Structures are given as C-alpha cells and as structure tokens.
Image (cartoon, grey):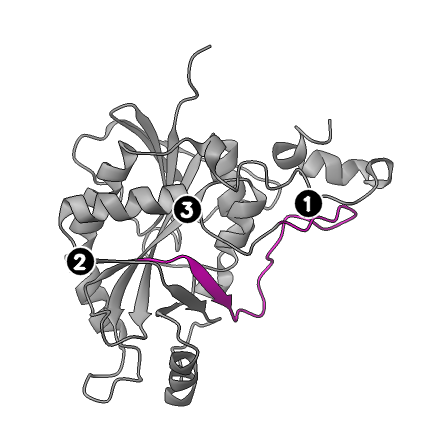
Amino acid sequence: MSARKNVLAVIGGSGLYDIDGLTQVDEARVDTPFGPPSDVIVRGQLGDTAMLFLPRHGRGHRIAPHEIDFRANICALKMLGATHLLSVSAVGSMKEDIAPGDFIVVDQFVDLTKRRRSTFFDEGLVGHVSFADPVCDHLSASLVRSAREVGVRVHEGGTYVCIEGPQFSTRAESRIYRSWGVSVIGMTAMPEAKLAREAELPYALLALATDYDCWHESEEDVTVDAVLALLDRNVSNARRVIAKLAGALPDPAQSRAASALAPAMITVRDRIPSATRARLSWLVGKYIP
C-alpha cells in the first residue's frame, strides 16, 4: 500500500502562495454546508507535497476578524484533502523579549471571542473534543526547525490571547493580558484552532509579531500602518518557512488530532437527525456511517 500523500493547508495572507518552486497552480471553489470559505483556494505542488492556500480575510482583506466564517474555511480545506494545517497570523507582542519582526510558534490559547460559531457539533449531535493541548506537537516542532533553518528569530512556545476585535485593545486591557503571562495577542486564532481539532487536522500556528500592542511605554501604540509595514517585510520569510515545512511534515497519524472525534461524540447514534448526519458526513462519516 502506498503512503498517504501529504497535503499542507495554509491559512493566512493572500501573498503566502507566491513560493519559489510551486507548480501546477490552480484555483478551487468549494461549496460547504456552512457556505463558501473566505475566498477561492489556491492549489499547487511543492516537491512531493500538495499545497492549499486560503486567504483568511479574502483577497484585498475585505472580511473583518469577527465576520470570518471559520467553519466554512476549515470544512473546505478538509474536503479538499488537507492532512496538515498551518495558520499564519499577525500578532501583537505582549513580552519585551518578543520584538516586532520575531516569529512565534505558539502552543496555548486564551479565547476571549464572543460572537463566533466555534463548533461543528450542533443540531442534534453533541461532541466534546479534548483541547487541553491545542496544537500538534509534531507539526509545531517541525515548524520551529524550519524557521530556524531559514534563519529567522523564532520563539518556541507561547500563549496567544484571541480578542474579538476589530478594535485593538484598550491600554487597561493590554496590561491585564500582560499580567496573565500571555505571549502574543491577535484576533483570528479562535475558533480556528478549535475547529481544526474537531476536523482532526494536525494544527500549528506561526505568529508574526508586528508591534507591542499598547502596553509598551517607550513604543508607539499599535496602528494599521505599522502592522502592514512590518508584515510586508516578513512575508518573504514566512514563505521560506512554509517551503521548508512542506518538505518536513510529520506523520499525521501520530498527531493527537488524528482520532480526536473517536471518544468525543456522545449522542446516541439512532437519535442523530438524518439532516445532521448528511451535513456532517465529511467530518463524521468514518464514525457514523
């Protein structure tokens, strides 16, 4: 039996797919039970790895963080065969030693979002996935190695606090989050990481620090112009890290995400509505025929 082909899905900015060596590039439009994803998905081949790229905010950055249909995004990538999921996200630094321009491979989250659909399980099917360790250790370790091989300054581990947005934090809020010991702050990691776990996708997050939020007394407060200027400088490094990671993907079967649903669904099978079975067949079909 041939080994399963690796398919690395990347969610981030629209320029991330401009990777040297990417071939067989085309676009896929996917209709999901939750509606369309943020944009068309760019597909390509990088060495032996198939690639999927989805701009989280849509091309032209037209979708605000609280308006992203995270369920449609994760579902679309899963339906296209993703075996691994890398999230690339701009963040504010909440620690002095994480300087703007640094990369961070986070391993924990604090979810402060309020209005987002954060699960695929509803309408008659209840599932409770384990989420104590929310990223894939193996994929995150490969991501750290890839970043170091590229030569960027990368911090291994850290907590990402996710706020609702789209406004940036008040100074009082920023100081409170700092007191919690978090590493970075952003608006997009949740519920993305939760849904990736429900979809049994090994997930890692590469955070790109763009500013010191507004807690730092000797630095300017965060602005959109400052964020975009630093992001532009970091995109080329992010593409290089992605290319390295594509050639060093771990076995997805070894991830804690691989069978996350097996013990999670507690609804008696004959009480699951047929419409819900059909809507979630892409997700639970191997457990609920």
Q: Which mark is residue 153?
A: 2
- Residue 142 lies, in percent from the top left, at 31, 42
Residue plotted at (42% across, 12% down): 2
Q: Which mark is residue 230?
A: none
Estimate the spatial distance between the alpha carbons at disc 1 and disc 3, rounded to whole Å.
20 Å
Q: Which is more N-terminal, label 3 or label 1?
A: 3
Q: Are marks 3 and 2 in contact (CB under 8 Å)?
A: no
Name of the residue lying farthest toward the top: 1
Q: In the depicted view, which residue is nearer to us: 176 or 138?
A: 138
Residue plotted at (31% across, 84% down): 215
Residue 69 shows up from this direction = no
Mark 1 falls on what kind of element?
A: loop
Compared with 172, 129 (above or below) is above
Q: In the depicted view, which residue is nearer to us: 259 or 81?
A: 259
Q: Which is more N-terminal, label 2 or label 3?
A: 3
Residue type of the residue flagged with mark 2 = Arg
Boundaries of the magenta span: 105-129
- Residue 176 lies, in percent from the top left, at 43, 84
Residue type of the residue flagged with mark 1 = Ala
Q: Choose mark 3 or mark 2, whichever is in front.
A: 3
Q: Choose mark 1 or mark 3, whichever is in front.
A: 3
Mark 2 falls on what kind of element?
A: loop
Residue plotted at (49% across, 67% down): 110
What residue did someone put label 1 on?
A: 264
What residue did someone put label 3 on?
A: 137
Q: Which quadrant of the structure image shows residue 171? A: bottom left
Is residue 283 rendered to the left or right of residue 51?
A: right
Mark 3 falls on what kind of element?
A: helix
Q: Main secondary structure of the magenta part?
A: loop
- Residue 71 lies, in percent from the top left, at 55, 49
Mark 1 nearby-residue class (10 Å; few <14, some 14–19, many ≥20): some
